[in-house]
Amino acid sequence: MPGPRLPASLAASTGAANHPSTSHLVLIPSYNTGPRLCATVAEACQYWHPVWVMIDGSTDGSGAALTKQRRKDASVLVLQRDRNGGKGAAVLEGMREAVVRGFSHVLVMDADGQHPASSIPEFMALSQANPEALILGVPVFDSSAPWLRVAGRLLSNAWAKLETLGAIGDSLFGFRVYPIAPLLSIMDSSRWMRRFDFDVEAAVRLSWLGAPTINRPASVRYFRAEEGGVSHFRYGRDNLLLTAVHARLMAGFIPRIPSLIARRVRSSHY
């Protein structure tokens, strides 16, 4: 099975921070992220333009603070949703606007600073060289990672690997580059994928659709509360949601097994 096509020089893509891309943008959904939001956007802007932020019904003033900070920065677009709808809903609305403005791909990253802005150029360059592919971040945890979060994702990852015959390196890490058109098609035909279920289902269903998957390591940093860290993850609620997601995906996986195996066999012969 051939590996991903690589650009001649990943380093060349760092110039995008001075020359805005017309095809790939950074999309940051945010809900009550606090002061950390402005810092995350500033870091992203060091490595890529344009950067869009979708304020998903925030009530903590972070959207207003970002708008004030970036008022004269044409490389940053701040979009507002009146009500909180969840990560998937925020990404969906951002992608719809991106299509209207001619973009084909979005790199989605969290607003809380956990994801590595310094990896944006590498992920974007991989996407530009492999435009049909889903570029998935695989987290590299450090000592700041809560052990319960690290251990808890193992089960979801095991299910996702089964559901895609091993294509997905990590099902929950939200640092990714999506090709917009196929993901919009999937989401527009489903009433799911609007909240915490978005990351898992988007990756699995894109793989089912035939999108090549490129897994790339990316560092993770968990900020403590005194450092401005914010988490909306709720172990009971969100683990129940993940259980429902994988039950739904397994129901779709079983009838797809023959076609997925056939696709895997064909790709191994290239």
Image (spheres, rainbow, N blue to C red):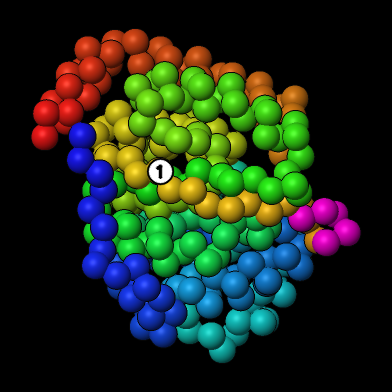
Residue density around tag 1, few if under 14, some if 14–19, many if 20 or more, within 10 Å: some
State the residue in front, 121 or 200: 121
Is 127 included in the stretch rendered in magenta? no
Taking the spot 27% from the left edge, 16% from the top edge, the residue there is 256
- Residue 166: where, in percent of width, then height? 38, 26
Residue ranking furthest to the right: 226
Taking the spot 40% from the left edge, 53% from the top edge, the residue there is 177
State the residue in front, 265 or 40: 265
Taking the spot 76% from the left edge, 63% from the top edge, the residue there is 34
Please state if 255 lies on the left or on the right of 63 as rendered: left
- Residue 132: where, in percent of width, then height? 24, 48
Magenta stretch, main secondary structure, is helix
Q: What range is drawn magenta here?
A: 223-227
Residue indicated by mark 1: 215
- As drawn, 208 above or below 131: above
Please state if 110 lies on the left or on the right of 171 as rendered: right
- As drawn, 98 above or below 248: below
- As drawn, 87 above or below 105: above
- Residue 266: where, in percent of width, then height? 13, 26
Q: Secondary structure at mark 1?
A: strand
Q: Amino acid at mark 1?
A: Asn
